[in-house]
Image (cartoon, grey):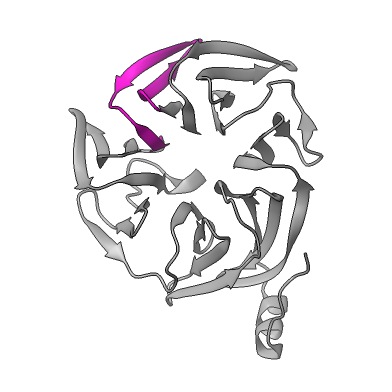
Amino acid sequence: MAGHDLSLDEKRVYDARGDREELLVATELGVVAVSVSDDLVGEFGVDHRCVARDVACADGYVAVAAEEDVLLGTDYGETGFGPATAVGFGDGLLAGDDDGRVARYGDGDWRTLGRVGAVRAVDGPLVAAADGVYRVRGDELVDAGLDDVRDVAGAGVPLAATGAALYRLGNGWMDVLAGDFHAVSVGGERAHVGDERAHAATTEALYARETTDEWTRVDVPVDERVVDVAYATAICAITADGTLLLDAGDGWRTRALGVRGVGGLAVR
């Protein structure tokens, strides 16, 4: 897959910028690496071929939940977990699978922490599963409630996307938006309790949070389902059909990556 053609003016602007960042997209074709600068897309291509279901990055580390194994590092080395559906960095590297196994990686081996419903997402110390949210506490999994959880955001005040609503953790789980939610993200590595930037998606809409309690529907320039949002210099969103959307403050720019079966997005 070759990089897309920039206009001459775009190339001059892109080449002059020193704040280039790299996005990794988990797709059924493999892990796609995309070079971006603010809201401009540079070169992109397949960094590793596999059926990638999820991708996570933290402190220079890359982990991929793939059909055959959890892959780790810039060389995408196999770790021995087996087929995985979700990965995330919290207290170490965590991974989960369709059978509900949740494990932590360390010293070259996996330690199983417990079994839950089918694992759908991992973020920080939180696990989203078919039967609820679970919190990793030491070497144990603690049931934190809810049901049919599709995604979680563990930074700052936790959020959970479920088939019934988007929830925020306060004095228990409080619903903030009704709907069939499947994705939620907050602030990335920059997130903390005072950083209220977050996004959540249903099959038909994307919502943004600017303050703790205020969510608004975001107009995006494509009629495709947003499956994940990540935060670089720009806000970055990816659709199930492989369209990348970037907003650096002047509205959305889009670029079709030519891939399908998108499972996740991360900033390397």
Residue 257 falls in image quadrant: bottom right
Magenta highlight range:
130-154
Report the predominant secondary structure element of the magenta stretch.
strand
Residue 245 lies, with reference to residue 6, above or below; the image says above
The residue lying toward the viewer, choosing from 13 and 244, is: 244
Q: Give residue 238's position: percent from left, percent from top.
A: 52, 58
Q: Residue at x 65, y 20 (%)?
A: 105
- What residue do we see at 44% from left, 17% from top? 116
**241 over 108 or under it: above or below:** below
Residue 65 in the magenta stretch? The answer is: no
Question: Looking at the rendering, which quadrant does residue 232 occupy?
Answer: bottom right
Quick check: can you spot residue 123?
no
Quadrant occupied by the N terminus? bottom right
Residue 41 horizontal/vertical position (percent): 64, 70
Q: Is residue 6 left or right of residue 200?
A: right
Give the residue furthest to the bottom: 8
Report the side of 57 relative to 183 (left or right): right
Is residue 139 within the magenta segment? Answer: yes
Task: Identify which residue is drawn at 80% across, 32% down.
Answer: 77
Residue 71 seen in the figure: yes
Provide residue 79's location: percent of width, then percent of height.
74, 24
Number of numbered discs overlaid on the protein picture? 0
Task: Identify which residue is drawn at 42% across, 68% down.
Answer: 223
Residue 225's spot in the image, x, y percent? 43, 58
Front residue of this view, candidates 26 and 125: 26
In the shown orientation, is residue 167 left or right of residue 220?
Answer: left
Quadrant of res 244? bottom right
